Amino acid sequence: MSGNSRENKLSKLATPSDIEEIEGLNLKDLATEKRSARVHASTQASVRAEQEIGEYAARVTISGRVSIPIASALRRAYMEHRAQGKQPATRDGIIAEALEDWLKKHNYLMT
């Protein structure tokens, strides 16, 4: 056994060839499960996004400037909503809801 403790710790780590020797482990199944987990996670994120934004599932990026008090109030609002489990709980969700209300009020968006 070597006197170098780091070398000893590294020698205990599994190498790719060690993994191949594990009895009953099918690497193809493992790769499929890994892909499935990634797809499932992205599906869950999509479902949460659709629940939050309702019928407006497709989004485009817009940008604009607001005053510091509006930005501060927006930050406080989405953080409080997130902490309380209320919707919308994101900056984008609150902005989308506010724009939708304004556009409907001024007859630019019909319900």
Image (tube, grey):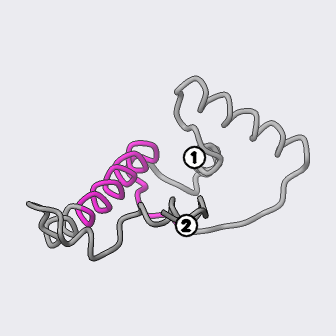
Identified by mark 1, the residue type is Gly
Q: Nearer the viewer, mark 2 or mark 1?
A: 2
Can residue 37 be found in the magenta stretch? yes
Range shown magenta: 34-59
Q: Which numbered disc, 2 or 1, marks the residue that appears first in the sequence?
A: 2
Q: Which residue sits furthest left?
A: 24
Q: Position of residue 107 (x, y in %)?
A: 58, 52
The dominant secondary structure in magenta is helix
Q: SS class of the residue under badge 2?
A: helix
Tell me what residue is drawn at x 45 percent, y 43 percent: 52
Q: Position of residue 93 (x, y in %)?
A: 57, 46
Q: SS class of the residue under badge 1?
A: helix
Front residue of 44 and 38: 38
Tell me what residue is drawn at x 84 percent, y 54 percent: 66
Tell me what residue is drawn at x 44 percent, y 66 percent: 11
Tell me what residue is drawn at x 46 percent, y 47 percent: 53
Residue hosting label 2: 7
Q: Position of residue 48 (x, y in %)?
A: 40, 45
Residue hosting label 1: 93
Residue 41, picture quadrant: bottom left
Residue 33 relative to residue 89: left or right: left
Q: Residues within 10 Å of mark 1 (few under 14, many from 20)?
A: some
